[in-house]
């Protein structure tokens, strides 16, 4: 599944598209600035994905500060069978530069 840019994500949010946003940064990072996603640090992704009650085709966008942790989260979720997972390219840093 392709990654998504900050501009593309912003447009999709403004169109009120059904996207599940997951912030994989630590809680203190999420508190400083966030775009409305559920805060689930990278270390908890595996546990969370095992308990997840969403269909495997749910569209998910994962993000972090720069895109590195969320890239790992994308891989983990994809390995768990989620077929529509995007990484926010450049993370929150790219979002804030818009």
Image (spheres, helix red, strand yellow):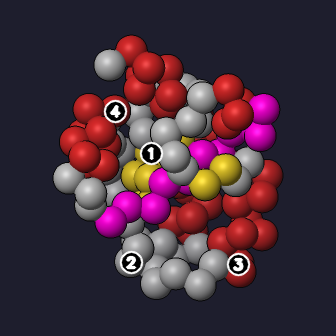
For mark 4, give the secondary structure. Answer: helix
Question: How much space separates mark 4 and mark 2, taking CA atoms?
Answer: 22 Å
In percent of width and height, residue 1 lies at 34, 57
User: Quick check: can you spot residue 71?
Assistant: no
Q: Does residue 31 appear left or right of residue 21 in this picture?
A: right
Which sits earlier in the primary sequence, circle 1 or circle 3? 3
Provide the residue designation for mark 1: 87
Provide the residue designation for mark 3: 50
Q: Is the C terminus in the top left, top right, bottom left or bottom right quadrant?
A: top left
Provide the residue designation for mark 4: 6
Q: Does residue 41 appear left or right of residue 68 in this picture?
A: right
Question: How much space separates mark 4 and mark 1, taking CA atoms?
Answer: 10 Å
Question: How much space separates mark 1 and mark 3, taking CA atoms?
Answer: 20 Å
Image mark count: 4
Which sits earlier in the primary sequence, circle 4 or circle 2? 4
Provide the residue designation for mark 2: 57
Is there a contact, CB below 8 Å, between mark 4 and mark 2? no
Let me know if residue 24 is in the magenta part: yes
Within 10 angstroms of label 3, few (less than 14), some, or many (20 or more) residues?
few
């Amino acid at each position: 599944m392709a990654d998504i840019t900050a501009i593309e994500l912003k447009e999709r949010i403004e169109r009120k598209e059904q996207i599940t946003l997951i912030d994989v940064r630590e809680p203190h990072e999420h508190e400083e600035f966030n775009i409305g996603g559920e805060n689930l640090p990278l270390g908890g992704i595996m546990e969370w994905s095992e308990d997840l009650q969403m269909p495997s085709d749910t569209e998910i966008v994962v993000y972090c500060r720069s895109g590195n942790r969320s890239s790992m989260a994308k891989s983990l979720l994809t390995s768990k069978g989620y077929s529509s997972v995007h990484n926010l390219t450049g993370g929150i840093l790219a979002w804030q530069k818009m």
